[in-house]
Image: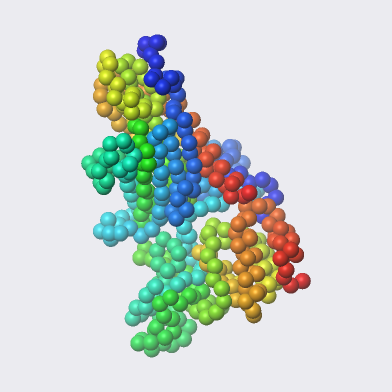
Amino acid sequence: MTEEKRKIVVPGETIVEGDDYLPGENTEKRNNKVISIKYGLAEEVQGLVKVIPLSGTYLPRRGNVIIGRVENVLFNGWILDIKSTSNGFLSVAEYPRYLDKNSLDEAMDIGDLAVVKIYSINKRGVDLTLKSRGLGKIDEGVIIEVNPNKVPRIIGKEGSMVGLIKEKTGCNITVGQNGIIWIQGENIEGELLARKAVEFVAANSFISGLTEKVEKWFEENGGKK
Amino acid sequence: MTKEFKRHDGRGLKETRKIVAKVGVVPNADGSAMFAFGDTVAIAAVYGPKIMHPQHSQDPEKGTLRCTYNMNSFSVSDRIRPGPSRRSTEISKITGWALDPVVMINKFPTMVVDVHVNILQANASTRCAGINAASMALAHAGIPMKNLVASVSIGKLDKTLVVDVDKKEEDFEEGEGATDIAMSLTGDGDLTHIQLDGHITSEELKEAVKLGQEATKEIIEIQKQALKKAVQEDEE
């Protein structure tokens, strides 16, 4: 994260003017001006101007790891609610083990949660896979939901924030890009502390120097040294 | 224009009623806003983008903006019959058309963005307050937009042009009577919607649009401040 002050912008607002700037995510160039097309925080890094949105539903992207809840079991796969604009489809062929056609619900039933990866997006919907490391059905732990726009701050630069929380609480944390977070620890105390920490990050996500703040928070609220 | 024209509430000719704007008034929605011109209070809630139902209304090429306008039965002193009416259906369409040029939902095929506008209290210019609230709510919901939209009604009372008509002025009957011109403009001053009932010459209409441009500039500024204030409050 850059230390410079970030500016709140609304759609149609001019962020910067001049030839030296390139329009990045959620911006548009009109008559030599870089204009925001979303409500969010404007940021400029080496001439590239982008807007980090503050709100909006999660938009699926290929390669994202997300957490979904099984909504329906079909003969050839599962429909997952991924807290997005559409549901995701997980084909039985993308399940890592061989399954008997009649026993799909024994592997995953309605209401079960799973860490999945988006492997393709087409006009009909989102296709998911379970064939990768770290993916699979969730059997235990704590699930929390946050605003998907705050996920980048929870992960931090190169995973620094989530790494810190993992280290301090001894929990395993999987952050779905759709804002669902899975915390799994050895004991319930650690899990609850991790949940509180994640909620703290989500509530203070617009403060600069947040990693230091979280370190301080852990000093006050306990956690492993 | 007659110089001595006085508005019944003592406002200047180019003065709007007291504007109150706020975002985040409906926590359940993806985005929401409240906008008030004096006694006219509108709230808007935005849901989506989400898959369009019924399926036959889906557009596989681009996203759809679906607006609904509703006046609460208690919004006026004579209780109005709840439910859709000819008038509310028309204003729903108009609200959609006023906002459609700015929302960039081409990249959401088969999806819909739902905008619900509710009038809590009415004292004329309800469609304008509704459009203003809807524009803020769309931005608040994180929908990509080219610009914000602001709406205002310009009235021609006899021969005088006034900004932001209220109920008493709408029913003005002296001289040539009242002409109510509702219009919506983007932040760049481009018209997205204009409607009028009554008589007006083309010169006067041009003059009215000019007045509208000035008034919407101020309204856009208020909308911006309301959106920005919501983040700062979050931070504290």
Q: Is residue A151 visible?
A: yes
Residue at image coords 49%, 73%: A116
* Quadrant position of residue A1: bottom right
Q: Nearer the viewer, residue A79 or B236?
A: B236
Query: Residue B133: where, in percent of width, then height?
Result: 42, 41
Name the side, left or right, on which B140 lies relative to B77.
Answer: right
* Quadrant position of residue B12: top left
Residue at image coords 31%, 26%: B170
Query: Residue A71: where, in percent of width, then height?
Result: 39, 73
Quadrant housing the N terminus of chain B: top left
Query: Residue A114: where, in percent of width, then height?
Result: 49, 75
Q: Is residue B1 above or below residue B217?
A: above
Residue at image coords 48%, 50%: B142
Q: Is residue B3 above or below residue B118?
A: above
Residue at image coords 62%, 76%: A188
Q: Is residue A215 visible?
A: no
Query: Residue B144: where, in percent of width, then height?
Result: 46, 48
Q: Is residue B160 above or below residue B131?
A: above
Q: How is the image coloured?
A: rainbow
The number of callouts visible is 0
Give the farthest residue toward the right.
Answer: A225
